[in-house]
Amino acid sequence: MGRTQLLGDYTGSRRRVIQWGIMQGIGLTLLLAALAWGASGLPHLGIVGPLVLAIILGMAWRATVGVGDGMTAGIAFSSQKLLRLGIILLGMRLDWRDLVHAGPQVAAMAVIHVMFTLTVVALLARRFGVGDRLGLLTACGTAICGAAAVAAIAPQAKATPEETAIAAAIAAIWGTVFTVAYTLLYPVLGLTAGAYGIFSGATLHEVAHAIAASAVAGQEAVDLAVVAKLSRVALLVPVALLVGLRARRAVCSEAGANSGAQVQAERSPIPVPWFILSFLAMSGLHTWGIIPAAAAGYMVTASYLLMAMAMAGLGLNVRLSAFRRQGMKPLAASLLGSVLLALLGYVLIYGFGLSNL
């Protein structure tokens, strides 16, 4: 047997080993996503949701079983490529007509809430000594739509998988806590079912949190909560663009005295989040009725499965020691931001004349 043939056999065998490792990594994220999906149907776990449970299961798997080096590429594929596909398909949940019918007050509340929360949480995180990327992701998760927003903004912010997973977990923790608190406080808030639904959707972190909290007030509250929540989700697009511009300026600033590097950075294209724009395009297809309702429902389900696989992949990249080391300060910043967001939302419900809706 010649040297060339031996080299060819080794290369082919090595390629098969790598491919098998990638398949194992993807398969592991699929397994954890399926377990999270099933667990979310159990009593009391529906509030948490499959995305959060997938992160937790991923972290638990790494801490107990561990992750082989060969699986890293497959896990990265799930946490990056499949995540973007999931976000694109999530556009099938957004119907722009619902936002228009909700009226300008709901849209105004969404803009005010997102701007306020992004600013407050980012400033608090910086004051507490949190890194810029982690602070920004924590602010986006608190302000827009929890884990999905964190995952969507992370590529624009050049965040690490560990930072992404920590920020997503923080949004999930407080979203779940506030969901329970809203449910307990509903009888004493003095809001009608419709007003309470808007309040829930306008201030809670995830779509699942808004639905779970508003369910105590009936179907009308749930419907309005989803509309108010999706008004904030729609702002994911401009926020992602702004974050991309901010990251580009940071690159230019770091180039500093190196004039050649600075010119090259300034001439580099503005990072356009094409998967976010595709999300917007998918919502347009749904709004215009081009995609049948049944097919749109299946696509939304597929979206959450893909994002759960991505969240599992992110969880598999997080060490519990790292969360204890890096997560406590942004956890506090998100808590304070969430409290202030809830208070602002309650004030605006009355300020915009929605208390008797």
Image (cartoon, rainbow, N blue to C red):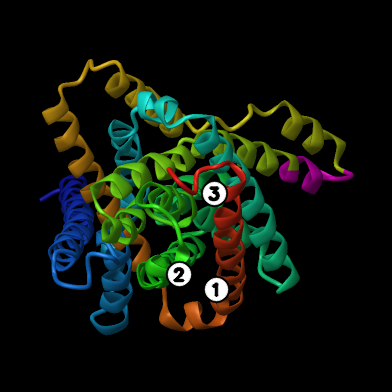
Give coordinates of residue 198: x percent, y percent. Answer: 43, 47
Q: Which residue is mark 3?
A: 349
Tell me whether circle 3 and circle 1 mark residues in contact (CB < 8 Å).
no
Disc 2 to disc 3, C-alpha distance: 22 Å
**Structural crowding at the residue carrying mark 1, measured as other residues with C-alpha within 10 Å and reported as few (<14), some (14–19) or many (≥20):** many
20 relative position to 265: left or right:
left
Circles 1 and 2: CB atoms closer than 8 Å? yes
Q: Earlier in the sequence, mark 1 or mark 2?
A: 2
The region drawn magenta spans 250-257
| Circle 3 residues within 10 Å: few <14, some 14–19, many ≥20 | many
Asked if the magenta segment contains residue 222, the reply would be: no
Q: Amino acid at mark 1?
A: Leu
Instruction: Answer few, some or many: residues within 10 Å of disc 2's Cα (few below 14, many 20 plus, some between 14 and 19).
Output: many
Q: Earlier in the sequence, mark 2 or mark 3?
A: 2
Residue under the point 13% across and 70% down = 42
Percent coordinates x, y for residue 299 in the rendering: 19, 35
User: Which quadrant of the rendered structure holds the C terminus?
Assistant: top left
Mark 1, residue position: 331
Identify which amino acid the numbered label 2 is placed on: Trp
- The verdict on residue 253 being magenta is yes
At which x and y percent is residue 179?
Answer: 38, 66
Kindly identify which numbered label has been placed on residue 174: 2
Give the spatial CA distance, label 3 vs label 1: 27 Å
Residue at image position (19%, 54%) is: 10
Q: Secondary structure at mark 1?
A: helix
Q: Position of residue 297 (x, y in %)?
A: 17, 35
| Residue 176 in view in this figure | yes
Where disc 3 sits, the SS reads: helix
Q: Is residue 310 above or below residue 249?
A: below
Is 356 located above or below residue 51 in the figure?
above
